[in-house]
Image (spheres, helix red, strand yellow):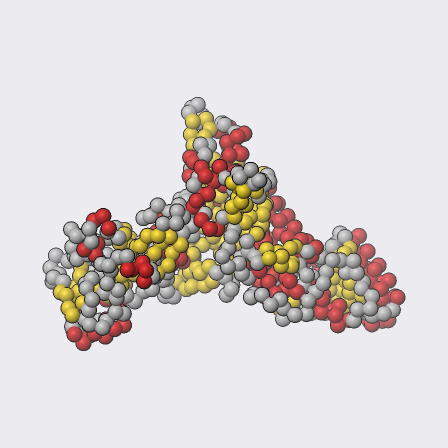
Amino acid sequence: MVTRLSQLFLRTLREDPVDAEVASHRLLVRAGYIRRAAPGIYTWLPLGLSVLRKVEAIIREEMANIGAQEVHFPALLPREPYEATNRWTEYGEGLFRLQDRKGADYLLAPTHEEMFTLLVKDLYSSYKDLPLSLYQIQNKYRDEARPRAGLLRGREFIMKDSYSFDVDDAGLDASYAAHRGAYLRIFERLGLEVIPVTATAGAMGGSRSEEFLHPTDIGEDTFVRSAGGYAANVEAVTTVVPAETDFSSAPSAVVRDTPDTPTIDTLVAASNELAPRSEADGGAWTAADTLKNVVLAVTLPTGERQLVVIGVPGDRGVDLKRVEANIGAFLPIGGEIGLEAANDDDLRKQPLIVKGYLGPGLSVDEPLLGAESSTKLLYLVDPRVVRGSAWITGANEAGKHVYGLVAGRDFTWDGIIECTEVREGDPAPDGSGPLETARGIEMGHIFQLGRKYAEALELKVLDQNGKQVTVTMGSYGVGVTRAVAALAESNHDARGLVWPRAVAPADVHVVAVGKGEEIFATAERLAADLEAAGLDVLLDDRPKVSPGVKFGDAELVGVPTILAVGRGLVDGVVEIKDRRSGDAENVAVDKAVDYVVNAVRSN
């Protein structure tokens, strides 16, 4: 079809929007693809919808290729299914809740696991009905505290979420592999680089999880990779654990006066002065010889605030994202939590915590911090704190530290948690070399949910023996609006957007440059011929608009091929320009349509 700029609902902007933080946000607004309606909420304009629909079409084709069938749920949902899975509470403040005029509770869906599960339960009851994969492309809602970066982190967004239903785990493995392959093909067709990385399942639950990250400096997710092929989200990286040490002949721990040493740096300096260590015993003390005990405050979905102490080597910082991803194994979380360093009010409620001199219990027989067992705090340690390792750490008394405190002999712990920052050069857990860190945007996430939701909502089928079995599920999401933003982020230059041809709002942008009737007539004829050849055409037929504005808009809008009809017409040629490379060529008018068609088909 031919879309005429003289009639198109479009206003391009010369200035960046004041709230734009990233290139995709800036250019999508300036080029007339989206408009801000409220913080984190955007209106899609005709050009933006064209790109969005092409992204959706690619997703639909690849979902169909693996046999998935499309359904469409409402975005406004009743409370009861989410109450059954406890996510009405677990989602915390991230959930948009509302009531109807009769006082019944509803929510704007952040995701639809419950509804998919109940739909299959309603209609299917036999193993003969499975395997089954259903999907939808639907608006989702999350009450982001700080929506930012335009479409990349909004309160309303569009996702493709699909769910597989199988009788057994072998079936789930096959469904997971099919979706994983489909995702790789989707991103390849979109022209969007992604790296599949191992991830944590988090509140979603399940036994396996992978994210598809688009590498970019503006990404909110940090991931690591090695030259040997290992890749993981930092939350999912596992530590290479040191070997345990025989401590049967280790000397007893010694408590020393260490006044004015509330930090690791001051403790190391004082230790090298008060208790210098010989080269034979390891040389000068460093931060890696100290055990730092960090007090964190966890706000559970119920609103309860609980303190947790984590012991880590003093040369390592605590990564709160890693803690959040892994602490669910030790606390009744099951949903979104708040996590931060304990504040002064928190510490005042625990008088046994001596700030700057906190250590673990000095005996496995004593409650943590010397408190009564009923007030014992949860104590977790980094995997590097192995049995037999000896540490300098706080003595739970102001101005005192204990030297040679041996893990497993002098103190124990309630659990081991992956919690410290991952550094460049750390060894990959699979032995494939040192890690390097990078940033990325999460474009998709796939989970083996298992039976979590099926059990909560009693989704069962009769198996081959006539016995009821609980269905096992997978969940697979792609950020559709986020894909548009990521494509804009990775496909632009100083002049504007440069869309990949697969998602561009048109195949060719015909620009009538000049005032002569012949110029406009030729542009009209070429546009009609290109349309007849099966191409989508954007025609700038606006009268009384300067060539500079028209060319500026063409480069800003970012259609892959620009065909300019102007002064060259007296010589029987038009200019055809490749928007990405900037290469331009004068082509005879009667050859122009074939030239453009070949350019489109070659890409």
Vertical comparison of 205 with 542: above or below = above
Picture residue at 18% right of the left edge, 67% below the top: 400
Q: Residue furthest front?
A: 102
Vertical comparison of 528 with 261: above or below = above
Residue 7 spot, x, y in % from top left: 78, 58
In the image, taking residue 109 as reference, residue 366 lies left or right, namely left
Q: Quadrant of the C terminus?
A: bottom right
Residue 491 spot, x, y in % from top left: 60, 63
Picture residue at 42% right of the left edge, 63% below the top: 437
Q: Residue furthest top?
A: 466
Q: Residue furthest right?
A: 517
Picture residue at 59% right of the left edge, 55% below the top: 41
Q: Quadrant of residue 468?
A: top left
Q: Quadrant of residue 408?
A: bottom left
Residue 571 showing in the rendered view:
yes
Vertical comparison of 170 with 486: above or below = above
In the image, taking residue 460 as reference, residue 249 lies left or right, namely left
Picture residue at 62% right of the left edge, 59% below the top: 36
Residue 314 spot, x, y in % from top left: 28, 66
